[in-house]
Image (cartoon, rainbow, N blue to C red):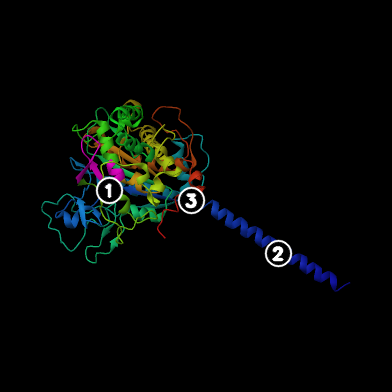
């Protein structure tokens, strides 16, 4: 009896020790999993330089034609303000403000920042963010391209191109910004831009969005309809939100004709003739989904099918578009990102974009930079088949922060970068954890994006399945 009880006690104690160890291990890993940092990419637009020749320094490299399709665009510039430099400064400052979340003292500072936007907030949620910048600082000779003589053995634009490209010396594929962003598998990408255009009054800001497959499919319906039925399809388009905001580069076509032209680019890589009924086989804009390294890649860089009749036929049908990429385009997550949503259209991309801009307006007011009457106007979005909002598997807040031909906007972009950066950082936090509703037009709604629906997608976390295996 004496010998058996100690053995039993030892056995019970051992089980207790094992139970405690497992309990705290599970609790630790559960806590770690719940508090894993969300990855956010800050994407300052452009950078690089518009150098000659295009064959070396161009953009949008086509792996079938084996050439760059367009000259490189280094970004807007007006009266000494260069977009690429300004938005990079903003990105660095946003990164700094979000880095405050890494320490207890920093979190208290960030809490005081948030109180400018939500006086009722009393604690910081989450475990901070994994912040990544999409590109390095812009080239120092960007304003001196007329006198600068480039070394043709150096590809100055390699770190700044959106799409993949061949290495200038080895010819091997180099990943562009879109591919690298997808490799990081972020939940949110904040693309920062300035436009060189003019807006009246006290300046303006605008979102940049690309609709989803269901909107572009209207063009397929139009092309495949009789001349009589086309009128009803056009009427359907004109009843949509997009009929007001579609990007209208010039008056050579109507807004609807530009929509048709962009739809041809979306489906085939070619522009259409002005009628929107047939392809313009002399104007190839690129099969952009094949310029990206991702799980939807069709293998063009590896010697896949080239430009053939499938891409230049005069009519298209929804059944023509199959394979991994088109399955993606027709999926629920792409509809969540690009259609419907809290703004009524444009999906989570448009909501996130507008929310960032609304935080900037609120920040300018809360920091007593401008009165409410002198705040920049939140304008309608630019809508087209844009690259980043389409080809990344993340919610994309793509914003034009200012119109450089407006005096007030130029003042904002020179004197108040820190204030706007602070506001963007607060907006990013709110997109994940929410803040209080301001109940005022063109001020933050304060609603978090429902990232859980992407995490719980039937085929796996939508932000994770993009990376090419």
Percent position of residue 378, x then y: 33, 31
Percent position of residue 128, x then y: 47, 49
* Lower sequence index among marks 1 and 2: 2
Q: Indicate the quadrant containing the C terminus: top left, top right, bottom left or bottom right.
A: bottom left
Density class for disc 1 (Cα within 10 Å; few <14, some 14-19, many ≥20) is: some
Marks 3 and 1, Cα distance to the nearest angstrom? 32 Å
**For the residue labelled by badge 2, is the local secondary structure a helix, a strand or a loop?**
helix
Query: What's the mark number on residue 17?
Result: 2
Seen in the picture, residue 147 relative to 7 is either above or below; the reply is above
* Lower sequence index among marks 3 and 2: 2
Residue at the bottom extreme, as displayed: 3
Q: Which residue is mark 1?
A: 311
Is residue 429 found left or right of 26 in the rendered image? left
Residue at the left extreme, as displayed: 147
> Between residues 462 and 219, which one lies in front from this camera angle?
219
In the rendered structure, which segment of residues is drawn in magenta?
Answer: 264-282
Percent position of residue 399, x then y: 33, 40
Asked if the residue at tag 2 contacts the one at tag 1, i.e. Cβ–Cβ closer than 8 Å, the answer is no
Which quadrant of the structure image shows residue 359? top left
Give the total of numbered labels.
3
Seen in the picture, residue 149 relative to 228 is either above or below; the reply is below
Q: Which residue is mark 3?
A: 461
């Amino acid at each position: 009896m004496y010998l058996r009880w100690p053995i039993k006690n030892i056995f019970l104690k051992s089980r207790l020790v094992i139970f405690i160890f497992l309990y705290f291990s599970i609790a630790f890993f559960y806590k770690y999993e719940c508090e894993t940092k969300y990855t956010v990419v800050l994407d300052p637009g452009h950078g690089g330089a518009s150098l000659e020749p295009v064959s070396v320094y161009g953009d949008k490299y086509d792996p079938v034609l084996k050439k760059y399709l367009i000259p490189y665009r280094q970004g807007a510039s007006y009266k000494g303000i260069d977009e690429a430099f300004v938005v990079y400064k903003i990105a660095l400052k946003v990164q700094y403000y979000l880095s405050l979340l890494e320490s207890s003292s920093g979190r208290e500072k960030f809490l005081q920042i948030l109180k400018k936007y939500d006086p009722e907030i009393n604690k910081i949620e989450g475990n901070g963010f994994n912040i990544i910048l999409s590109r390095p600082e812009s080239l120092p000779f960007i304003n001196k391209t007329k006198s600068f003589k480039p070394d043709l053995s150096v590809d100055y634009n390699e770190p700044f191109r959106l799409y993949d490209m061949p290495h200038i010396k080895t010819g091997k594929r180099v990943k562009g910004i879109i591919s690298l962003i997808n490799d990081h598998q972020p939940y949110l990408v904040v693309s920062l831009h300035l436009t060189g255009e003019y807006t009246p009054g006290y300046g303006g800001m605008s979102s940049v969005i690309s609709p989803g497959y269901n909107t572009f499919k209207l063009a397929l319906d139009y092309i495949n309809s009789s001349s009589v039925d086309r009128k009803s399809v056009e009427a359907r388009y004109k009843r949509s939100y997009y009929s007001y905001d579609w990007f209208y580069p010039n008056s050579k076509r109507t807004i609807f004709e530009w929509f048709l032209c962009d739809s041809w680019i979306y489906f085939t890589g070619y522009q259409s003739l002005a009628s929107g009924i047939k392809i313009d086989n002399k104007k190839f804009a690129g099969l952009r989904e094949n310029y990206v390294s991702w799980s939807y890649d069709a293998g063009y860089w590896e010697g896949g099918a080239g430009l053939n009749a499938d891409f230049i036929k005069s009519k298209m049908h929804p059944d023509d578009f199959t394979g991994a990429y088109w399955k993606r385009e027709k999926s629920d997550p792409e509809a969540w990102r690009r259609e419907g949503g809290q703004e009524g259209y444009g999906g989570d991309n448009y909501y996130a974009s507008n929310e960032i801009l609304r935080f900037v307006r609120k920040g300018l007011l809360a920091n007593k930079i401008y009165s409410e009457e002198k705040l920049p106007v939140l304008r309608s979005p630019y809508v087209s088949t844009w690259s980043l909002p389409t080809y990344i598997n993340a919610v994309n807040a793509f914003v034009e922060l200012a119109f450089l031909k407006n005096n007030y906007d130029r003042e904002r972009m020179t004197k108040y970068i820190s204030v706007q950066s602070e506001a963007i950082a607060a907006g990013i936090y709110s997109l994940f954890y929410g803040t209080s509703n301001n109940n005022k037009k063109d001020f933050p709604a304060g609603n978090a994006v429902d990232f859980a629906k992407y995490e719980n997608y039937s085929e796996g976390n939508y932000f994770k399945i993009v990376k090419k295996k």
